[in-house]
Amino acid sequence: MTTSKGRKRKASAPTSVPHRPHLLEWLKDAANAAAYVEAALEEDNPAGLLQALRNIAEARGGMARIAAKTGLNREALYRTLSRRGNPQLKSLAAILGATGLRLSVTPAAPR
């Protein structure tokens, strides 16, 4: 490609690259998914945790598959993991189990 003054111009790189496909591929690994949930928990942001769980559900088979494995219908699963969702412990444990994860408790770091 040349400019109006005859100089060669470098081919431009895209201004951004979508991260979602890479994120979903990365979350297919159970260790990565667990670290992702841990990071979301450390942020102390319930909406962020629910978004992390939605991403993991999508990466690990999709909402329909996770709904079938948990016994929740798909609409209830979407509602549970929505920004305003407030999952019960039983639902949360079922969702984590369906994605290959589990709940655990560890000592908190001293503040």
Image (tube, rainbow, N blue to C red):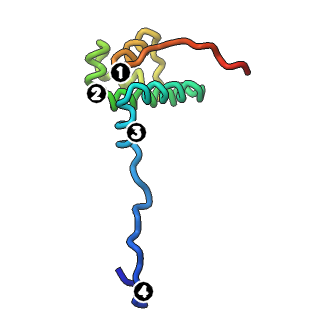
Residue 21 in which image quadrant: top left
Asked which secondary structure carries label 3, the reply is helix
Dot 2 crowding, Cα within 10 Å, few <14, some 14–19, many 20+: some
Q: Residue furthest bottom?
A: 5
Which residue does the numbered mark 4 point to in the structure image? Answer: 7
- At x 47% / y 13%, what residue is drawn? 103
Which residue does the numbered mark 3 point to in the structure image? Answer: 23
Badge 1 vs badge 2, beta-carbon distance below 8 Å: yes
Residue 60 in which image quadrant: top left
Of label 1 and label 2, which has the lower sequence position? 2
Residue 47: x and y in percent read: 51, 28
Distance CA(mark 4)–CA(mark 2) = 50 Å
Asked which secondary structure carries label 1, the reply is loop
Mark 1 residue type: Thr
Badge 1 vs badge 4, beta-carbon distance below 8 Å: no
Q: Is residue 12 left or right of residue 43?
A: left
Mark 2 residue type: Gly
Of label 1 and label 4, which has the lower sequence position? 4
Distance CA(mark 1)–CA(mark 2) = 8 Å
Residue 23: x and y in percent read: 40, 39
- At x 43% / y 14%, what residue is drawn? 102
Q: Nearer the viewer, mark 4 or mark 2?
A: 4
Which residue does the numbered mark 1 point to in the structure image? Answer: 99
Residue 16: x and y in percent read: 43, 56
Which residue does the numbered mark 2 point to in the structure image? Answer: 61
Seen in the picture, residue 53 relative to 24 is either above or below; the reply is above
Mark 4 residue type: Arg
Of label 1 and label 3, which has the lower sequence position? 3
- At x 32% / y 14%, what residue is drawn? 70
Distance CA(mark 2)–CA(mark 3) = 14 Å
Residue 29 in which image quadrant: top left
Mark 3 residue type: Leu
